[in-house]
Structure formats: C-alpha cells, structure tokens
Image (cartoon, helix red, strand yellow):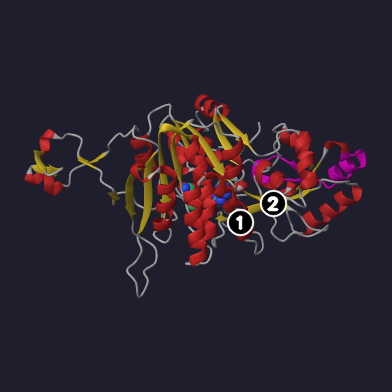
Amino acid sequence: MNQLYYGDNIDVLKHSIEDASIDLIYIDPPFNSKRAYNVLFESVDLTDVKAQKEAFADTWSNVSYIDEMNEIADLNLGLYSFLRTLDHLNLSKGAASYLTTMALRIHFMHKKLKDTGSFYLHCDPTMSHYLKIVMDLIFGVKNFRNEIIWCYSGGGIPKKDFPRKHDVVLRYSKGKEYYYQPVYRPYSSGTVQRGRTQVKGKYYKTGLRQEGTPVTDWWIDVPKITSPTDPEKMGYPTQKPEALLERIIRTSSNEGDLVADFFCGCGTTIAVAQKLNRKWIGVDISHLAIRLIYDRLLKPYEEQAETYQEIKDNIEINGFPKDIAAAKDLAKKTKKGPFKFQDWIIEILLRGVSNPKKTADGGYDGYITFLKSDKDKGVILIEVKSGNVSVKNIREFIDVVNTENAAIGIFVCFKEQVTQPMLLHAKQAGYFEPEIFGQRYDKIQIITVEDLLAGKLIDYPSYPNSTFKQAPKARNLEGADNSTSLFE
Ligand SMILES: C[S@@+](CC[C@H](N)C(=O)[O-])C[C@H]1O[C@@H](n2cnc3c(N)ncnc32)[C@H](O)[C@@H]1O
C-alpha cells in the first residue's frame, strides 16, 4: 500500500517507517530557515481574500533546534561537532539551526534506506556546501556519487551579479552496491553529422552507440516550470518538473521498488513514481499539499474507472482523523494545535478555502467557489461548529449567507447537535435555483461530521470546482465533476 503522511517528517521517520526498507529517497527541502512556504492557489474572486495558506508552522525555529542538536550529540558525534562549530562561528544567522533540523532528518532517512539504496538531496548554492559536509558525515565520504548541476533559464536577472540559474542535487549511495541504470540523450546534430562521438576518451562511430550520449552530471535539458500555462503546473510555488524526477527515479530504482519523498510538496516524486510503477511514500507538513497530491494522482484517471479505483485503493492517507472519536479529539485540541478542526473540515473534507479573516460569530469559516455559468462564479459559504449549537446559530448564518449574496450556505456540526428546529429553519431559507441547471438546491444545508466522514458530498451545481486548480486529466473529459473525496 502506498502511504501519504500529513505531518512533520521527523515523527513519521521515527515511528512509521521500517528500517532498511526504502530503495530510493529524493528530498527537496525548503532552502533556508527564514522562508515560510505559502501554498498559492488560483485566485478566488471573493472580496479581497487571497487564497493563500501558511503551509507549515515554524518547524525550523531556533527553539526546536536546541533539542535536535542534543539528540544529534547522542547519534553522531562527528556531525554534532560540525554543527556546534558552525553555531560558534555564527557564519550565517539561522544556517546552524537549518542544518541541524536537516541533519537529524537525514540521519533517520539514511537508516530507512536499504543497504543498496540511493539518496538524492536537492538544494541550492546557498546551502549545498554545508549540506554536503552533513551528507559526508552521515553517508561516508566514499559513498558520495555525484554533485548534479541542474541548469535552467527563466526568472529575474540581477543588475550586479551573474544570474543564478542552477540548483544542486547531491547524490549518495548507502553502500558499495547500488542500482544504477545510465540514461542517454540523443546525440546533437553536429555529432551525428561528424559521424563519431567521444566517450571516456575513446572515439566511437555514432552507429556503435544506438542509445545516444550518456547523461553527465550537468543537466541542461530539463526546463524549469515557469509558464503559468504549463500543463504540469499545480500552483505550488516550488514545484519541480516531472522530467527531473523521471530521470532520477529511472536511474536509481527498478519497477516495484519503494521510492520516498519526505518533503513531497505537491507530489512530483510521488506522481512520477506512480507512473513508473514504483511503490511510494510521501510526507508533507502542509495539509494542503496532501490534498493536492491526492487530486494530482487521481484526477487524470477520472474517466478510467478501473485504474482510478486501483490507484485509490492503493493509497493510505495518514495524519487526518479517520473516525468520529479522532474528529472529536481534534476539535478539543484545536485551540492549541497547529492543525485546526475547521481547516480539516473545510480544506480536506469539503475541499474549500478557510476564511483567513476569522471572526467570532456572525461571520463564516470558509467558502467554495463554483461556476454558475461559463463566466460567473458563485460562492458557497461554510460555517463549522464543534461545540453546542442552536437555532440561533442557523438564523445568524442565514443572515450572513444573504448579506454576502452567497448561493448556498453549508453548516457543519456533530450529529448529536442537530435538532428538528434547526432543520426546519434551514428548510425555510428556501432554495438556490440557477436557471441553466433546471434544478434546485437547498439554500442552507446542515451536514454532519459523521456524514462527511462517510464520504457524503454537499449538493451544489456539479461544474468542475473552480476554487483550486485541478491536475490535468489523462484524456479530454466532458462535464466531469469534482467529487474526489479523501475518505470515500
Ligand atoms: C521545496 S517544497 C517541495 C516541492 C516538491 N519537490 C514538488 O515538486 O512539489 C518543500 C516542502 O517541504 C515541506 N516541509 C517543510 N518542512 C517539513 C517537515 N518538517 N516535514 C514534512 N514536510 C515539510 C513543505 O510544506 C513543502 O511542501
């Protein structure tokens, strides 16, 4: 079963993954500690709200790093000494804390690799030299295999520096024996014309090497995703191209092998591993990333029922409540924890957007947009209650839905809170009746957490959901809906 984890990868690494079980790990962590990763989704036309979510809490803070430094002291003294030295030198503010956070995680990833496994660490030139020492101290200098330079174009041009247009990918093996399947590029037209090529100092007639020329450690043939109309683009700011991951996965794993990405973002590694028939594990600390990956894996196969079901049955999602007891537990902890009950309901189960302008009562907690016609967007407001509710809450919510001129209002609470007067009031609010659909929808819909967990979907015009950008489809579809539910 393929595993998708929502949470901090250190917890997953320590508690959920077997030692020596993974064939290939690729990671593309945030490049430095100061950067907060916001997941930028397609714009949403609701007043001035930006559909932008803070993707992870401050895992990289200076406080947690002190504990991690002490943990490293028990695990790897050499690594600890190096990190302490950096800390004392105070070379760059935050670099020591960033590297400590990374070092602890890489230590555990190394443990999870099979003896024949390979590891790729994607980083940029501001951190690659420090990270290489961390890697040498964990994997051993003799297991360093390549420093791959991934060159690309696009983006800004500084006035007083050479434009920085490459990333660094450090490749290590766990031991002496490791899988390596060389990849080739077609010969350039010049080489073909001259009729010969040079490999390891020897000249070959072109015809002798049918595969092409071996790919070296500088990669200039994989373009970065820059264009907003790129069909791969998911709206995730640090998304890597599938061609990059395809090269890595083909080179260092076989069909049926287990591939893992512990900072998986919008799931490029996972999507490619799936396509190339590898088993996979993905982890991300952003719940929105997990939702995006799930859609990315399934959307392309919506019209191919058997494949769709097969992929779906093979994915286990961990880290979200799976039953009502866990949902109630999350509701109780929601004030203290980084992951809120409301966000789970709105962003994971209802696939909407949490309202960044949180209000006490008298507002709404989230929304979904949909296409009312080929041009106009309609809005569905969402209100989530985890505690006591009464008719008064329904009345207030009806007022908000009317004031905001929303098409529909969805009121979510636990089953035990729903009363007959609440249902009656909701019914009396009438219907949303868009002419072109020839159908009517309850204006105020009360839906329980129990229903949502059972996979029930809300009732609204079933155009493609226009709130979030969708993964491209495998084939052209007509009138497909947006009903990929995480826990159907
Ligand atoms: C640079 S992005 C990865 C992009 C990815 N390669 C792709 O193509 O979409 C880094 C990701 O690491 C995640 N992340 C940061 N700290 C994490 C942690 N401690 N555990 C798990 N994921 C984390 C962020 O939420 C972000 O999605």
Range shown magenta:
417-445
Instruction: Say whether residue 190 is magenta.
Output: no
Label 1, on which residue? 66
Residue 43 screen position, x and y as percent: 57, 57
Q: Earlier in the sequence, mark 2 or mark 1?
A: 1
The quadrant of the rendering that contains the N terminus is: top right
Query: Is label 2 in a helix, a strand or a loop?
Result: loop
Classify 238 as above or below 461.
below
Residue that badge 2 annotates? 338
Q: Is residue 457 visible?
A: yes
Residue 409 placement (x, y as % from top left) = 76, 48
Residues under labels 2 and 1: Cα distance? 20 Å
Give SS at disc 1.
helix
The amino acid type of the residue labelled 2 equals: Pro
For ligand 1, tell me if the residue under mark 1 lies within 8 Å.
no
Looking at the image, is 188 positioned above or below residue 314?
A: below
Residue at 74% in and 57% down: 405
Viewer-nearest residue: 71 or 214: 71
Total count of labels: 2
Q: Residue at x 38, y 48 (%)?
A: 170
Residue type, numbered disc 1: Ile
